Amino acid sequence: NAGVTQTPKFRVLKTGQSMTLLCAQDMNHEYMYWYRQDPGMGLRLIHYSVGEGTTAKGEVPDGYNVSRLKKQNFLLGLESAAPSQTSVYFCASSYQRDRSSYGYTFGSGTRLTVV
Amino acid sequence: GQSLEQPSEVTAVEGAIVQINCTYQTSGFYGLSWYQQHDGGAPTFLSYNGLDGLEETGRFSSFLSRSDSYGYLLLQELQMKDSASYFCAVRDGDSNYQLIWGAGTKLIIKP
């Protein structure tokens, strides 16, 4: 099993450019998440989805949009990149909360630099 | 508000035992989890405590006391490969059951 796959792994954007980060999971998980992690900090939730066709805002949603058209895919879009969005982005997936003992499975991350 | 506190850094010697503490403050508690993250890597799930007590998985154990809003991760027989950051996370009912994350504890292991 591949688990959670994120593309791309690295990207450099100019301020104002847009891009889409792709996340795919093959574990039939219902829930999917997008996090950002900045140096020396924990994970901050950007958006999440509790099922196909549903999305919800997390702690830091401004400047990002998401879509989950298929259960296995969760896309994160940056509409107009800003230097403050320079970060490492992680996608994760999990079963429903009644199976919390299985934890979250994370992708390998996307390192984004906005110049 | 919701918050988790864990030490920013812990140093231990190879072969020894180390305990990483986590205290939390949340409106609705639905379990404490621990994750490991090596430098440049992704977080990986270590353990979950939904009820009070100790859960053991090999060299790692995790403990929870809901009455004290406290938990810890215990690592035994430390190996150099255990050098990593360790995050506690709480599932919170007031946040639509999403995980609230601590800032992480960097574990430094000396030979």
Image (cartoon, rainbow, N blue to C red):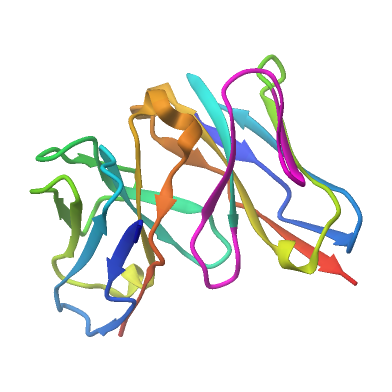
Q: Quadrant of the N terminus of chain A?
A: bottom left
Q: Is residue A88 above or below residue A63?
A: below
Q: Position of residue A37 (x, y in %)?
A: 45, 61
The residue lying toward the viewer, choosing from A43 and A107, is A107
B79 relative position to A63: left or right: right
Residue sitting nearer the eye, B20 or B9: B20
In front of the other: B56 or A64: B56
Q: Is residue B86 left or right of residue A75?
A: right
Q: Residue at x 39, y 23 (%)?
A: A98
Tell me where residue A73 appears, x and y as whole percent. 18, 54
x and y, in percent, of residue B99 in the image: 45, 37
Decide: is A43 above or below B50: below
User: Which quadrant of the view contains residue B16?
Assistant: bottom right
Q: Is residue A62 visible?
A: yes
Task: Pick out the residue farthest to the front.
Answer: A1
Q: Is residue A71 above or below residue A109?
A: above
Left or right of A83, for residue B21? right
**Would you say residue B40 sits in the magenta stretch?**
yes
Q: Along the horizontal axis of the image, is B47 left or right of B63?
A: left
Query: What range is drawn magenta here?
Result: B37-64
Image coordinates of residue B10 in percent, x first then y, are: 80, 56
